[in-house]
Amino acid sequence: MNLIESLTAARPIDGSSPAARQHASAQPKAEIMNDREVADYLLANPEFFAEHAELLASVRLANPHGKAAVSLQERQMDMLREKNKHLERRLAELLRYGHENDSIASKFGRWTTRVMAERDPGALPRTIANGLRDVFDVPQAALRVWDVSEPYSQADFTRHVGEEVRIFANSLATPYCGANTGFEAAQWLTSAVSTVSSDAATTAEGTPPANGTKSIALIALRDPEAKDEAAAFGLLVMGSPDSRRFHDGMATDFLTQIGALASAALSRLLPR
């Protein structure tokens, strides 16, 4: 008796008395159960294989690896092995993320130390941007601030800030990461490259010019002593010629922390 025949034989018949069963035997043979009915029956009757233990050894299943048919137990072992492989890959992925986070945290600590050690408020924008390039290996970094105290109002880091940039910065509740679609702020990266290198075009060994920026991260700078909805007083920009360096699906926790610390440091430039 095969599995379908066993299930058909085991299928409940209306009326459980001997008379009912004798009456049923005189009726035409019931139709064989279809696939869905077999599955539903096994789910509803987990004791089936306990009552028909011989089927566990006789049932042969197709082998997904192209070999000869295998027993139910062998197929279950294959499924468990596949599940274990998936769990191992997932564990390796989590470990890799953990190592990456440890590395980023270490870099964040070094960058923070460098920013805190800068005593000249006017040098902070350069220190912050240079630190991001040096410590985090960001190909391009620049920032601009506005509405600063009079002594800093003519500094390079306050220039080339259009009204659209201010409006955009005010709209950023979280860092933006994604493709460089022609952001005005991306133009700041060109002047940043010129400051770092004497050659604005740079060679393959230098920092690529802003017109080669394919991905970008934009972080609004807000006074930490103001309310959460306070207007931005600056915008931090990071760029890369690698379109995958900053993408819309990446985590922004560390970028948010970078923005918070940069905001706190640069708030020394604001009028008090």
Image (cartoon, rainbow, N blue to C red):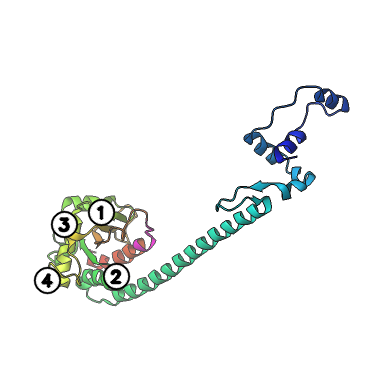
**Disc 4 versus disc 1: distance between alpha carbons?**
30 Å
Q: Quadrant of the N terminus?
A: top right
Front position in the image: 177 or 235: 177
Ranked by sequence position, the earlier of labels 3 and 4 is 3
The amino acid marked with disc number 3 is Val
Q: Is residue 150 visible in this depiction of the protein?
A: no
Q: Position of residue 169 (x, y in %)?
A: 25, 53
Vertical placement of residue 169 versus 23, above or below: below
Secondary structure category for the residue under label 4: loop
Amino acid under disc 2: Asp
**Are the two marked residues, 2 and 3, in contact with CB atoms closer than 8 angstroms?**
no
- Give the foreground label among 4 and 1: 4
Q: Type of residue at label 4?
A: Asp
Q: Amino acid at mark 1?
A: Ala
- Where residue 87 sits: x, y (%)? 55, 60
Measure the alpha-carbon separation of dots 2 and 3: 26 Å
* Of labels 2 and 1, the one closer to you: 2
**Residue placed under numbered mark 3 in the picture:** 161
Placement of the C terminus among the 4 image quadrants:
bottom left
Choose top left, top right, bottom left or bottom right for residue 126.
Answer: bottom left
Q: Which residue is mark 2?
A: 137
| Location of residue 115 by image quarter | bottom left
- Say which mark, if any, is on residue 169: 1
Q: Secondary structure at mark 2?
A: loop
Mark 3 or 4: in front is 4
Q: CA distance from mark 3 to mark 4?
A: 24 Å
Secondary structure at badge 1 equals: helix
The residue tagged with tag 3: helix, strand or loop?
loop
Number of residues whose C-alpha sits closer than 10 Å to that of mark 2, classed few (under 14), some (14–19) or many (20 or more): few
Which class describes the residues within 10 Å of circle 3: few (<14), some (14-19), or many (20+)? some
